[in-house]
Image (cartoon, rainbow, N blue to C red):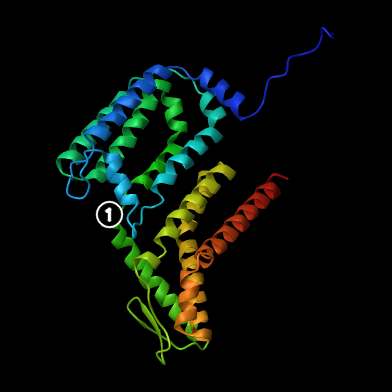
């Protein structure tokens, strides 16, 4: 037996998770208050009982997320994204001075007032914001100001859990007008005679006609691409300017993606008629088309910025 042998530290997800858990102070304080805070929103979270006959804010959120034409179906995925990014930042977070920080109570108090206002005025969206604001304040109280500052990203991504409600119409309508204008212009440049009326696209000879409804506005892809661009920018770069650049790319990339998909529909309809265009429109494989140019541009821009940074340091 070699007396000089050293014991190797076990590596892997579970040993790492256990080590992180052991290093985290004030766990009982945080998780007890967290459970009480979430219980409040379960039993006294929703004051609109006309649609959802439950006082639970979580039941109201589930109802909104599961609507067939909902623009908020991505909501249940956001917590997994945020938790994954917290895991990615775990070493940076645990390197902070972890201690009780009572000014976080002010953030928590603000969250209580926000929920009270949302509950009384029957605006559950405000209560959703209050719920996450309260969790943010609890983290500050339990683990300190430095933890709170470092966790602003990814915590602010929880804003995508808030249902858009009437705001969705104000966003989707301009998107519909923009993409139909672009598709009509591009189709006519390709000698495909397309007439545009509002959000409708139709052939001059009447062989096909499509209405770009709210579900086809590109709202879903806008949210998905914004999340993708934001995560990519924050993971790959530390410069605030570069991170903002990737976030700003989301809107033009989502329009480009939706334009590409609708052009595929128009080209198919021109070649095979309305039924062929309908097939392309309803086929799930073609629903992935908006993301292909977005991913390609994000990767190309990312590599260009990396090469530019390397060239400047040499």
Quick check: 214 above or below 150? below
Label 1 SS? loop
Residue at 49% across, 74% down: 279
Quick check: 297 above or below 126? below
- Residue 8 falls in image quadrant: top right
Is 286 placed left or right of 139 in the picture?
Answer: right
Q: What x and y, as percent, mark residue 277? A: 48, 78
Q: What x and y, as percent, mark residue 210? A: 39, 78
Q: Quadrant of the N terminus?
A: top right
The residue sitting at the right extreme is: 1
Q: Which of these two is toward me, 99 or 206?
A: 206
Q: What x and y, as percent, mark residue 18? A: 56, 22
The residue sitting at the bottom extreme is: 205
From where the camera sits, is residue 61 visible?
Answer: yes
Quick check: 314 above or below 224? above
From where the camera sits, is residue 237 visible?
Answer: no
Q: What x and y, as percent, mark residue 187? A: 49, 82
Quick check: 308 above or below 137? below
Q: What residue would you read off at disc 1?
A: 165
Is 305 placed left or right of 97 in the picture?
Answer: right
Residue at 56% across, 42% down: 235
Q: How many residues crowd mark 1 within 10 Å: few (<14), some (14–19), many (20+)?
A: few
Q: Quadrant of the C terminus?
A: top right
Q: Which of these two is toward me, 91 or 37?
A: 37
Q: Which of these two is toward me, 290 or 136?
A: 290
- Residue 10 falls in image quadrant: top right
């Amino acid at each position: 037996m070699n007396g000089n042998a050293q014991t190797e530290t076990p590596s892997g997800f579970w040993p790492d998770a256990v080590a992180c858990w052991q290093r985290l102070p004030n766990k009982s304080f945080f998780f007890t208050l967290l459970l009480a805070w979430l219980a409040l929103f379960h039993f006294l979270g929703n004051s609109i009982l006309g649609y959802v006959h439950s006082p639970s804010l979580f039941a109201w959120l589930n109802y909104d997320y599961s609507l067939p034409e909902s623009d908020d179906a991505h909501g249940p995925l956001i917590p997994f994204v945020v938790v994954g990014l917290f895991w990615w930042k775990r070493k940076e977070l645990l390197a902070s001075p972890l201690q009780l920080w009572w000014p976080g109570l002010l953030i928590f108090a603000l969250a209580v007032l926000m929920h009270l206002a949302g509950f009384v005025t029957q605006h559950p969206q405000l209560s959703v914001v209050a719920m996450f604001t309260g969790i943010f304040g609890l983290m500050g109280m339990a683990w300190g100001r430095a933890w709170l500052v470092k966790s602003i990203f990814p915590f602010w991504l929880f804003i995508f859990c808030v249902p858009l409600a009437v705001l969705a119409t104000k966003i989707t309508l301009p998107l519909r007008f923009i993409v139909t204008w672009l598709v009509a212009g591009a189709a006519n440049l390709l000698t495909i005679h397309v007439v545009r009326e509002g959000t409708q696209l139709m052939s001059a000879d009447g062989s096909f006609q499509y209405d770009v409804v709210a579900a086809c506005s590109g709202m879903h892809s806008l949210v998905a691409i914004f999340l993708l661009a934001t995560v990519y920018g924050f993971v790959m770069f530390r410069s605030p300017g570069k991170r903002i650049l990737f976030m700003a790319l989301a809107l033009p990339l989502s329009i480009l993606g939706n334009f590409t998909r609708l052009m595929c529909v128009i080209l198919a309809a021109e070649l095979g008629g309305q039924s062929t265009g309908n097939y392309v429109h309803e086929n799930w494989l073609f629903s992935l088309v908006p993301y292909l140019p977005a991913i390609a541009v994000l990767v190309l821009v990312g590599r260009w910025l990396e090469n530019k940074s390397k060239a400047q340091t040499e």
